[in-house]
Protein backbone atom coordinates (compact mmCIF):
# COMPACT_ATOMS: atom_id res chain seq x y z
CA UNK A 1 0.00 0.00 0.00
CA UNK A 2 1.26 3.44 -0.96
CA UNK A 3 0.86 6.38 1.42
CA UNK A 4 1.30 10.10 0.99
CA UNK A 5 1.09 12.58 3.85
CA UNK A 6 0.27 16.26 3.54
CA UNK A 7 1.28 17.91 6.78
CA UNK A 8 0.60 21.57 7.54
CA UNK A 9 1.84 22.89 10.89
CA UNK A 10 -0.76 24.69 12.98
CA UNK A 11 1.23 25.71 16.04
CA UNK A 12 4.52 24.73 17.60
CA UNK A 13 2.72 22.04 19.61
CA UNK A 14 0.15 20.92 17.04
CA UNK A 15 0.01 19.88 13.41
CA UNK A 16 -2.62 18.57 11.04
CA UNK A 17 -2.64 17.05 7.58
CA UNK A 18 -4.31 14.68 5.16
CA UNK A 19 -3.01 11.14 4.74
CA UNK A 20 -3.84 9.42 1.45
CA UNK A 21 -3.68 5.63 1.24
CA UNK A 22 -3.97 3.69 -2.01
CA UNK A 23 -3.25 0.18 -3.19
CA UNK A 24 -5.23 -2.81 -4.42
CA UNK A 25 -8.72 -2.91 -5.93
CA UNK A 26 -8.32 0.61 -7.39
CA UNK A 27 -9.23 2.27 -4.12
CA UNK A 28 -7.99 5.48 -2.46
CA UNK A 29 -8.78 6.47 1.12
CA UNK A 30 -8.18 9.90 2.64
CA UNK A 31 -7.88 10.53 6.38
CA UNK A 32 -7.42 13.71 8.39
CA UNK A 33 -4.67 13.40 10.99
CA UNK A 34 -4.46 15.82 13.91
CA UNK A 35 -1.61 15.52 16.41
CA UNK A 36 -1.13 17.70 19.47
CA UNK A 37 1.05 17.71 22.55
CA UNK A 38 -0.53 15.94 25.52
CA UNK A 39 1.87 16.00 28.43
CA UNK A 40 -0.58 14.08 30.61
CA UNK A 41 -0.43 10.96 28.42
CA UNK A 42 2.35 8.39 28.43
CA UNK A 43 3.31 9.10 24.82
CA UNK A 44 3.06 12.91 25.31
CA UNK A 45 1.21 13.08 21.98
CA UNK A 46 -2.52 12.84 21.28
CA UNK A 47 -3.62 11.82 17.78
CA UNK A 48 -7.03 12.01 16.17
CA UNK A 49 -7.79 10.28 12.85
CA UNK A 50 -10.92 11.15 10.85
CA UNK A 51 -12.02 9.58 7.58
CA UNK A 52 -12.47 12.29 4.93
CA UNK A 53 -13.19 10.68 1.56
CA UNK A 54 -12.70 7.58 -0.58
CA UNK A 55 -12.78 6.64 -4.25
CA UNK A 56 -13.13 3.36 -6.16
CA UNK A 57 -12.81 3.13 -9.92
CA UNK A 58 -15.57 0.54 -10.23
CA UNK A 59 -17.99 2.89 -8.46
CA UNK A 60 -17.02 5.62 -10.93
CA UNK A 61 -17.71 3.24 -13.84
CA UNK A 62 -21.15 2.31 -12.48
CA UNK A 63 -22.18 5.99 -12.49
CA UNK A 64 -21.23 6.48 -16.15
CA UNK A 65 -23.89 6.94 -18.82
CA UNK A 66 -24.00 4.30 -21.59
CA UNK A 67 -21.64 2.14 -19.55
CA UNK A 68 -22.86 -0.94 -21.43
CA UNK A 69 -20.81 0.36 -24.39
CA UNK A 70 -17.63 0.63 -22.32
CA UNK A 71 -15.13 -1.90 -21.02
CA UNK A 72 -15.63 -2.32 -17.30
CA UNK A 73 -12.77 -1.26 -15.06
CA UNK A 74 -10.65 -4.19 -13.91
CA UNK A 75 -11.36 -4.52 -10.16
CA UNK A 76 -7.81 -5.79 -9.65
CA UNK A 77 -6.25 -2.52 -10.84
CA UNK A 78 -3.68 -1.31 -8.32
CA UNK A 79 -2.44 2.15 -7.52
CA UNK A 80 1.34 1.75 -7.58
CA UNK A 81 2.30 5.27 -6.48
CA UNK A 82 0.74 8.59 -5.44
CA UNK A 83 2.10 12.12 -5.65
CA UNK A 84 0.47 15.29 -4.38
CA UNK A 85 0.55 18.03 -7.03
CA UNK A 86 2.03 21.10 -5.30
CA UNK A 87 0.59 24.58 -5.63
CA UNK A 88 -2.83 23.52 -6.91
CA UNK A 89 -5.03 24.82 -4.10
CA UNK A 90 -7.70 26.76 -6.01
CA UNK A 91 -8.11 29.52 -3.46
CA UNK A 92 -10.13 31.72 -5.84
CA UNK A 93 -13.06 29.32 -5.46
CA UNK A 94 -15.37 29.27 -2.44
CA UNK A 95 -14.32 25.64 -1.88
CA UNK A 96 -10.62 25.06 -2.69
CA UNK A 97 -9.54 21.77 -4.28
CA UNK A 98 -6.27 19.90 -3.92
CA UNK A 99 -5.01 17.52 -6.62
CA UNK A 100 -2.97 14.33 -6.66
CA UNK A 101 -1.60 12.03 -9.36
CA UNK A 102 -1.66 8.23 -9.34
CA UNK A 103 0.39 5.62 -11.20
CA UNK A 104 -1.86 2.69 -12.09
CA UNK A 105 -1.24 -0.94 -12.98
CA UNK A 106 -3.71 -0.77 -15.90
CA UNK A 107 -1.31 1.52 -17.80
CA UNK A 108 -2.91 4.82 -16.89
CA UNK A 109 -1.81 8.01 -15.19
CA UNK A 110 -4.75 9.49 -13.30
CA UNK A 111 -5.32 12.83 -11.58
CA UNK A 112 -7.80 13.22 -8.72
CA UNK A 113 -9.29 16.25 -7.03
CA UNK A 114 -9.85 16.33 -3.27
CA UNK A 115 -12.39 18.65 -1.65
CA UNK A 116 -12.05 18.02 2.05
CA UNK A 117 -14.93 20.27 3.11
CA UNK A 118 -17.43 18.25 1.04
CA UNK A 119 -15.67 14.90 1.64
CA UNK A 120 -15.22 14.35 -2.10
CA UNK A 121 -12.46 12.63 -4.05
CA UNK A 122 -13.09 12.92 -7.80
CA UNK A 123 -11.30 11.51 -10.87
CA UNK A 124 -10.63 14.57 -13.05
CA UNK A 125 -8.18 13.47 -15.78
CA UNK A 126 -6.43 10.37 -17.12
CA UNK A 127 -4.19 9.07 -19.89
CA UNK A 128 -3.29 5.57 -21.10
CA UNK A 129 -0.20 6.79 -22.94
CA UNK A 130 2.15 4.24 -21.37
CA UNK A 131 0.03 1.20 -22.37
CA UNK A 132 1.75 -0.80 -19.63
CA UNK A 133 1.93 -0.76 -15.85
CA UNK A 134 2.93 2.66 -14.51
CA UNK A 135 5.09 2.25 -11.41
CA UNK A 136 5.93 5.76 -10.23
CA UNK A 137 4.67 9.34 -10.48
CA UNK A 138 6.31 12.50 -9.17
CA UNK A 139 4.77 15.97 -9.47
CA UNK A 140 6.68 19.24 -9.28
CA UNK A 141 5.97 22.94 -9.66
CA UNK A 142 8.00 25.16 -11.99
CA UNK A 143 7.88 28.91 -11.36
CA UNK A 144 9.36 31.48 -13.72
CA UNK A 145 10.92 34.73 -12.51
CA UNK A 146 7.78 36.67 -13.46
CA UNK A 147 5.63 34.42 -11.28
CA UNK A 148 4.17 32.26 -14.07
CA UNK A 149 3.74 28.68 -12.86
CA UNK A 150 3.54 25.29 -14.54
CA UNK A 151 2.36 22.08 -12.92
CA UNK A 152 4.60 19.31 -14.26
CA UNK A 153 4.34 15.57 -13.77
CA UNK A 154 6.82 12.76 -14.28
CA UNK A 155 5.67 9.15 -14.73
CA UNK A 156 7.71 5.97 -15.08
CA UNK A 157 6.66 2.55 -16.36
CA UNK A 158 7.74 -1.08 -16.55
CA UNK A 159 9.53 -0.59 -19.89
CA UNK A 160 12.10 1.74 -18.28
CA UNK A 161 10.65 4.92 -19.76
CA UNK A 162 10.38 8.19 -17.83
CA UNK A 163 7.75 10.55 -19.27
CA UNK A 164 7.14 14.22 -18.53
CA UNK A 165 3.79 16.04 -18.73
CA UNK A 166 2.57 19.61 -18.43
CA UNK A 167 -0.74 19.22 -16.58
CA UNK A 168 -1.37 22.94 -15.99
CA UNK A 169 -4.24 23.23 -18.47
CA UNK A 170 -5.98 19.96 -17.48
CA UNK A 171 -5.97 21.15 -13.86
CA UNK A 172 -7.36 24.56 -14.83
CA UNK A 173 -10.07 22.90 -16.92
CA UNK A 174 -10.85 20.50 -14.09
CA UNK A 175 -11.23 23.36 -11.61
CA UNK A 176 -13.72 25.07 -13.94
CA UNK A 177 -15.64 21.83 -14.56
CA UNK A 178 -15.81 21.00 -10.86
CA UNK A 179 -17.06 24.49 -10.07
CA UNK A 180 -19.75 24.35 -12.76
CA UNK A 181 -20.73 20.75 -11.98
CA UNK A 182 -20.83 21.29 -8.22
CA UNK A 183 -18.11 18.76 -7.59
CA UNK A 184 -19.02 16.26 -10.32
CA UNK A 185 -17.46 15.88 -13.78
CA UNK A 186 -16.41 13.47 -16.50
CA UNK A 187 -12.65 12.78 -16.60
CA UNK A 188 -10.66 14.94 -19.01
CA UNK A 189 -7.79 13.85 -21.25
CA UNK A 190 -4.39 14.46 -19.70
CA UNK A 191 -2.98 15.52 -23.06
CA UNK A 192 0.21 14.64 -24.92
CA UNK A 193 3.49 14.17 -23.01
CA UNK A 194 6.23 16.74 -23.47
CA UNK A 195 9.14 14.32 -23.43
CA UNK A 196 10.00 10.66 -22.89
CA UNK A 197 13.44 9.45 -21.80
CA UNK A 198 14.33 5.76 -22.06
CA UNK A 199 16.31 5.64 -18.84
CA UNK A 200 16.38 1.89 -18.08
CA UNK A 201 15.91 -1.52 -19.64
CA UNK A 202 13.01 -2.49 -17.36
CA UNK A 203 10.73 -1.22 -14.59
CA UNK A 204 11.47 2.04 -12.76
CA UNK A 205 10.83 1.50 -9.05
CA UNK A 206 12.26 4.73 -7.65
CA UNK A 207 12.05 8.33 -8.80
CA UNK A 208 13.02 11.70 -7.35
CA UNK A 209 13.14 15.25 -8.73
CA UNK A 210 15.30 17.99 -7.22
CA UNK A 211 15.66 21.57 -8.46
CA UNK A 212 19.23 22.87 -8.56
CA UNK A 213 20.13 26.39 -7.37
CA UNK A 214 20.76 27.36 -11.02
CA UNK A 215 17.20 26.42 -12.01
CA UNK A 216 17.31 23.11 -13.95
CA UNK A 217 15.99 19.92 -12.37
CA UNK A 218 17.84 16.73 -11.52
CA UNK A 219 15.66 13.70 -12.26
CA UNK A 220 17.03 10.55 -10.61
CA UNK A 221 15.61 7.07 -11.13
CA UNK A 222 16.40 3.50 -10.13
CA UNK A 223 15.33 0.31 -11.85
CA UNK A 224 14.69 -3.41 -11.49
CA UNK A 225 17.86 -3.96 -13.54
CA UNK A 226 19.98 -2.52 -10.70
CA UNK A 227 20.88 0.65 -12.58
CA UNK A 228 20.51 4.28 -11.60
CA UNK A 229 20.02 7.12 -14.06
CA UNK A 230 20.25 10.89 -13.62
CA UNK A 231 19.32 13.56 -16.14
CA UNK A 232 19.54 17.33 -15.89
CA UNK A 233 16.35 18.86 -17.25
CA UNK A 234 15.73 22.47 -18.23
CA UNK A 235 12.19 23.86 -18.38
CA UNK A 236 11.52 26.67 -20.86
CA UNK A 237 8.19 28.47 -20.94
CA UNK A 238 7.10 29.95 -24.26
CA UNK A 239 5.71 33.43 -24.73
CA UNK A 240 2.01 34.02 -25.37
CA UNK A 241 0.27 30.85 -26.54
CA UNK A 242 3.52 28.89 -26.85
CA UNK A 243 3.71 25.94 -24.51
CA UNK A 244 6.24 24.37 -22.21
CA UNK A 245 9.47 22.99 -23.64
CA UNK A 246 11.79 20.53 -21.89
CA UNK A 247 15.44 20.10 -22.78
CA UNK A 248 17.77 17.39 -21.47
CA UNK A 249 21.07 19.11 -20.72
CA UNK A 250 22.93 16.10 -19.36
CA UNK A 251 22.45 12.36 -18.84
CA UNK A 252 24.55 10.03 -16.70
CA UNK A 253 23.93 6.42 -15.70
CA UNK A 254 25.42 3.64 -13.59
CA UNK A 255 24.37 0.31 -15.18
CA UNK A 256 25.28 -1.98 -12.25
CA UNK A 257 24.81 0.32 -9.30
CA UNK A 258 23.23 -2.49 -7.26
CA UNK A 259 23.05 -6.27 -7.47
CA UNK A 260 19.24 -6.24 -7.29
CA UNK A 261 16.21 -3.96 -7.69
CA UNK A 262 16.78 -0.31 -6.78
CA UNK A 263 13.82 0.48 -4.53
CA UNK A 264 14.67 4.01 -3.45
CA UNK A 265 16.64 7.00 -4.68
CA UNK A 266 17.04 10.53 -3.36
CA UNK A 267 18.95 13.59 -4.57
CA UNK A 268 20.39 15.04 -1.37
CA UNK A 269 22.13 17.93 -3.11
CA UNK A 270 23.17 18.56 -6.73
CA UNK A 271 26.31 16.43 -6.46
CA UNK A 272 25.13 13.77 -3.96
CA UNK A 273 22.61 10.94 -4.43
CA UNK A 274 21.46 8.19 -2.11
CA UNK A 275 20.14 4.86 -3.38
CA UNK A 276 18.69 1.80 -1.66
CA UNK A 277 18.20 -1.72 -2.95
CA UNK A 278 16.93 -5.14 -1.95
CA UNK A 279 20.60 -6.20 -2.05
CA UNK A 280 20.64 -4.69 1.48
CA UNK A 281 22.91 -1.82 0.52
CA UNK A 282 22.37 1.89 1.10
CA UNK A 283 24.80 3.67 -1.22
CA UNK A 284 25.90 7.30 -1.36
CA UNK A 285 26.94 8.48 -4.82
CA UNK A 286 28.80 11.57 -5.95
CA UNK A 287 27.52 12.88 -9.25
CA UNK A 288 30.27 13.57 -11.77
CA UNK A 289 30.54 14.35 -15.49
CA UNK A 290 30.82 10.68 -16.51
CA UNK A 291 28.70 8.64 -14.09
CA UNK A 292 27.80 8.55 -10.40
CA UNK A 293 30.86 7.48 -8.41
Image (cartoon, grey):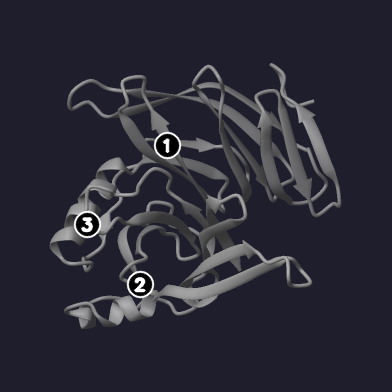
Say what secondary structure mark 1 lies in: strand
> What is the x, y in percent for residue 48?
57, 72
Q: Residue at x 55, y 50 (%)?
A: 159
Say what secondary structure mark 2 lies in: loop
Q: Residues within 10 Å of mark 1 (few under 14, many from 20)?
A: some
Q: Which residue is drawn at 49% across and 52% down?
A: 83
> What is the x, y in percent for residue 138?
51, 46
- Vertical placement of 40 versus 160: above or below? below
Q: Which residue is drawn at 37% across and 55% down?
A: 98
Q: Earlier in the sequence, mark 1 or mark 2?
A: 2
Which residue is denoted by mark 3 in the rendering? 94
Figure quadrant of residue 118: bottom left
Which residue is denoted by mark 2 in the rendering? 119
Q: Is residue 256 visible?
A: yes
Which numbered disc covers residue 192?
A: none
What is the distance, in whole Å, between disc 2 and disc 3 at their CAs? 15 Å
> What is the x, y in percent for residue 82?
51, 57
Amino acid sequence: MESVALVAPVTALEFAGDVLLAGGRAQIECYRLLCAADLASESAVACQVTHVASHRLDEHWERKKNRHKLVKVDPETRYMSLSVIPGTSSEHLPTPWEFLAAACSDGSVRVFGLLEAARKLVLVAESFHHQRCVLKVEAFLHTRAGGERRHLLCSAATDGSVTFWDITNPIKDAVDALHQGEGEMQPLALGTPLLTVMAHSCGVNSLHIHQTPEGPYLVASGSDDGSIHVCLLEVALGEGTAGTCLCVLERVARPCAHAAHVTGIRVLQPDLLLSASVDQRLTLWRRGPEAPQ
